[in-house]
Amino acid sequence: MMTGKQNISVGFLVMGLFMAYGFLLIYLRDFAPGKEEWVNSYSIGKHFESRLAHVHGNLFAFLNILIGFLLLQFRNALSHVKAISWLALTGLLMPIGILLEVYFGLPPIFVLVGAIAMTASVLWLGFSFYQMKSGD
């Protein structure tokens, strides 16, 4: 499989899922029984965590699309392309981990692993571009 291609593919799929999750959040805010309680908990608890997952899910999906595109375009000029690709994909555990916390009460280990992986992939890609010889 071409490195970077999977980031683009998974990025678009995850973005679509988190966009659809946004419809659930709209339902909970505007139409669900007990919507007033949901609205009143805007900045605390499950409401806040759910919004964090929605926003970070779309952000991290977009980052995977961008990273995948850049890895495809510059794969011959950059080093450690496969590692950067896998770290970016692993970063998706962060928003998924938030949902696992909200809906299943799991500990935040997935959030931490995902956040560290995505940060590492972005920094590593940045350093790789910095070290790339001009003209590549």
Image (tube, rainbow, N blue to C red):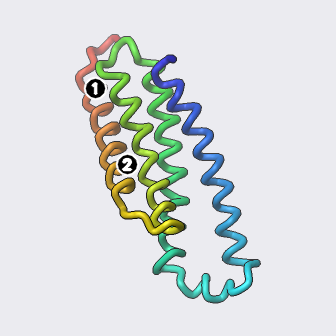
Q: Residue at x 66, y 88 (%)?
A: 36
On-image quarter of the C terminus: top left
> Crowdedness of circle 1 by 10 Å Cα count: few (<14), some, many (20+)?
some
Q: Residue at x 41, y 18 (%)?
A: 74
Q: Amino acid at mark 1?
A: Ser
Instruction: Count how many numbered circles sit on residues in the image.
Output: 2
Mark 1 vs mark 2, foreground winner is: 2
Q: Secondary structure at mark 2?
A: helix
Query: How far across and down, in percent of the image, does residue 55 sit?
Result: 52, 58
Q: Residue at x 67, y 77 (%)?
A: 29
Q: Nearer the viewer, residue 109 or 22?
A: 109
Q: Residue at x 51, y 17 (%)?
A: 1
Left or right relative to 127: residue 85: right
Q: Secondary structure at mark 1?
A: helix
Q: Which mark is residue 114?
A: 2
Q: Nearer the viewer, residue 134 or 31?
A: 31
Query: How far across and down, in percent of the image, does residue 105 sit?
Result: 45, 68
Disc 1 versus disc 2: distance between alpha carbons? 21 Å
Quarter of image, res 128: top left
Most distant residue in the right direction: 31
Q: Which residue is mark 1?
A: 128
Q: In the displayed structure, would residue 20 be above or below residue 32?
A: above
Left or right relative to 85: residue 32: right
Quarter of image, res 119: top left
